[in-house]
Every structure is written in C-alpha cells, then in structure tokens.
Image (cartoon, grey):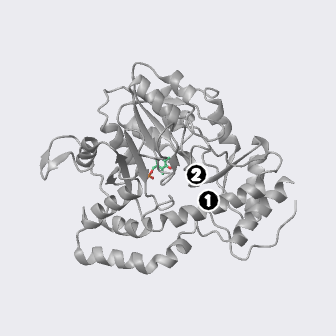
Amino acid sequence: MPTLPAPVIPVQLLDLAAQHAPIQAEMEAALQGVLRAAAFIQGPAVGQFAQELSQYLGEAEVIPCGNGTDALQLALMSLRLPAGAEVIVPAFTYVATMEAVAILGLRPVCADVLPGTFGLDPAAVAAAITPRTGAIIAVHLFGQCADLGALTRLARQHQVALIEDNAQAIGATYQLADGPPAVAGTVGEVGTTSFFPSKNLGALGDGGALFTRDPARATYLRQLANHGQTRKYYHEHIGLNSRLDTLQAAVLRVKLRHLPAWTAARQQVAAYYDAALTELPGLRIPVRDPRSTHVFHQYTITVAPDRRDALQAYLREQGVPSVVYYPVPTHLQPAYQYLGYRAGQFPVAEQLCRTVLSLPIHPCLDQEQQQRVVEAVRAFSS
Ligand SMILES: *Cc1c(COP(=O)(O)O)cnc(C)c1O
C-alpha cells in the first residue's frame, strides 16, 4: 500500500482549539461575567441557557444537570419504577446507558440493534418486553435517530416509558407518521443529553440536561436534580446533587448559538465522505434513515472484521486517526456479567463491535484534511 505524503495540517479526531478560536472572546466574556457576579451554583446563566436550549428544541422543557449519565439516572428516577423492574437497553451503545439502570437497582435487559442505523431493533425490543418491563431506552447513536416511530408505538402498546438517550444527536429530527418533524430527545417521556466537551454541543467540562414535554415531570426532575428539594431545606424526594455549573452554562449559551452552523459543517463533511467512499469494495458508509436527519456526532463506516484493524493501523500510519466506538457490546462488559449474558446472544451488536470504525469528523475539518482521510481510506481499499 502506498505511503501518502505527510499532511500539511495534522488530521485530528476533534479540534476544540480550532472550534473555539473564533468564539474565544465571547466565551471569555461569558466566563468573566460569572466570575464577577460570583453566583456559581444555579446562577442566572443556567436558567437562560435552559430557556435558549428549549427554544432550539421546539419548546420542550429543559432541565440542566451535572452530566449525561446523571441525566439518564434522573430520567429513570422520575419514572418511579419498582425495584427490580426491567429496562430495555441496546446491546450496542456507550456503557452509561446501561450503567444508569444498574446503579438504581433496576435490571438492564439488552436488546439487539439494527445493522444499518445501529439503533434498537424494534422486533428485538418487542421480544424482550415482559410484564416487568418499565422502560425502554433508545439511543440515537452517532447522531441519527433510532426507529422512533416503531419504538413509540411499542412503548404505548405495552404502557412502558420511552427514554431517549440523545447524548449524540442534539438537534436531529425525526419524521413520525404524522405531524411536523419531531425533535430528537423530545418524543419519549424523557430525553437526556450530555455536554461532555467532545459532544456536538460540548461544555468546558461535564454537563448534561433532560428534556420533557410534561411540565409536572419537569418540575419533579428539577427537584430530583437538586437533592429532591421543593424549596431550600425541604426535601420531598431522595434526589441527587446534579446541577449544571453556572460557568458551563455561560459557555454553553455562547456555543449553542453556533450549533446550527457546526451541525451543517459536520453534515457537509459527511456528504463529502459519502460521495468519495460509497463505491469502495468491502466498506459500507453510514446508512441514512430517510425519516431522520443525521447530525454526525460520528461518521462510522463498517468494514470486514478481518480488515478493520488493518485499516485502522494503515490510517494511523498515514496520519489519520480513527476510533472503534465500541469494541465491546454492553452485554459482554465484565461489570455486567451478573446479568448472565453469553457471547452470541446479540449477533448484530457483536458483529458491529468487530466491524465499525469512526473516521475524523468535526466542524473545523478543512477540505485538505477531508481529502487526506478519503485518500487514505481509498488507498487501503483499492
Ligand atoms: C456521552 C454519552 C453518555 C454519557 O454522558 P456523560 O456526560 O459523559 O455522563 C451517555 N450516553 C451516550 C450515548 C453518550 O454518548
């Protein structure tokens, strides 16, 4: 295989420095405002950010919290499920989706995903539902919605709650059978997101939020996220200390204004990759569900299992980083052995762990860097 000339500007998986450069002054001013006002916990920027994010999400209620994992835990707490209730989670996702279930003493029940979109397979979910099922957590993996149409129908039919883990798909929309496109994270009983720095809307540290269209649930979630208090020192519920820092909220207000442009830039990179990589033998570009937009948190290809690691090694040699999200399916993680799952039970998830590879995608990937990624992948594949 050819060795390509060294790229002029190194290709990075994530380039927060480049992304921040044009808004550095705005972010510094926002941070200084908080420093001067010295209201670090639940300062005004938290409520302002929640309001602005709510507008962006089509007026859903937004409840800021400490991080995306807490958001999942709070979402589950708000359902008041009995101890030991089952919660269906994808066998292919980031572990937090499952961790939040287990930490509450609920039982994670894995279900397989679809090979194209990587989202929960509705048929697998239907087969996993029992009288003990309390909720389904759909993950909009890599930036595209799971099959929200089928999953909402299933949840309604079986009277179980639908939680959307929207840590990777903020701003994506989904066309349900009727009505205008629905906003990811606002379709189920509760949606959750993360502002971990590498997410599409990232803070300068940890942060998260919940979404709901039910005002009563929003009130309950706000209390749960703040020690279960209804007013200061009156604790009606057992809650968490999970609040979004005012400093983070101030920065997120600045960054939210740029999110639509950043999303568009990610989609442009994806379109370029799609066109350049679509015909390559043994390689599949991301499958687009026509009902969903895709905000490309990741651009994830699949390649033959016996070629994947070699492709990754070749890309690395050519100065192109890539990542396997995720190498181990949730049901085979050592921490979850107690659930009694075996290899072979969720074949699609297991196969994806052997075949996926995420290529660099971020809003500041310039034309030359994109070309380098494409050339390296093509050089390996031809
Ligand atoms: C990042 C992520 C989380 C966890 O968010 P944190 O803010 O890191 O706790 C949960 N689910 C998915 C799908 C994620 O990508």
Q: Is residue 233 above or below residue 136?
A: below
Q: Count the marks: how many?
A: 2
Q: Which residue is drawn at 57% across and 26% down?
A: 123
Q: Position of residue 249 (x, y in %)?
A: 34, 64
In the displayed orientation, state which residue is furthest to the front.
179
Looking at the figure, which quarter contains the N terminus? Answer: bottom right
Helix, strand or loop at mark 1: helix
How crowded pointer 2 is (Cα within 10 Å; few <14, some 14-19, many 20+) is rated as many
Where is 63 relative to 120, above or below?
Answer: below
Q: Within 8 Å of ligand 1, the CB of disc 2?
A: no
Q: Is residue 256 above or below residue 138?
A: below
Q: Mark 2 points at which residue?
A: 294
Horizontal side of 259 relative to 215 (left or right) equals right
The span from disc 1 to disc 2 (Cα, nearest Å) is 7 Å
* Camera-nearest residue between 65 and 278: 278
Q: Residue at x 36, y 79 (%)?
A: 29
In this orientation, does residue 53 appear? yes
Specify which label sits upstream in the sequence, 1 or 2: 1
Mark 1 in CB contact with mark 2 (< 8 angstroms): yes
Residue under the point 72% across and 55% down: 274
Quadrant position of the C terminus in the picture: bottom right
Dot 2 amino acid type: His
Between 15 and 141, the one nearer to me in the picture:
141
Residue 267: mark in rendering: 1
Mark 1 surroundings: few (<14), some (14-19) or many (≥20) residues within 10 A: many
Please give left or right for residue 164 compared with residue 269 in the image.
left
Left or right of 335 in this view: 31: left
Residue 368, position as x, y percentages in the image: 72, 72
* Left or right: where 141 falls relative to 306: left
Secondary structure type for disc 2 = loop
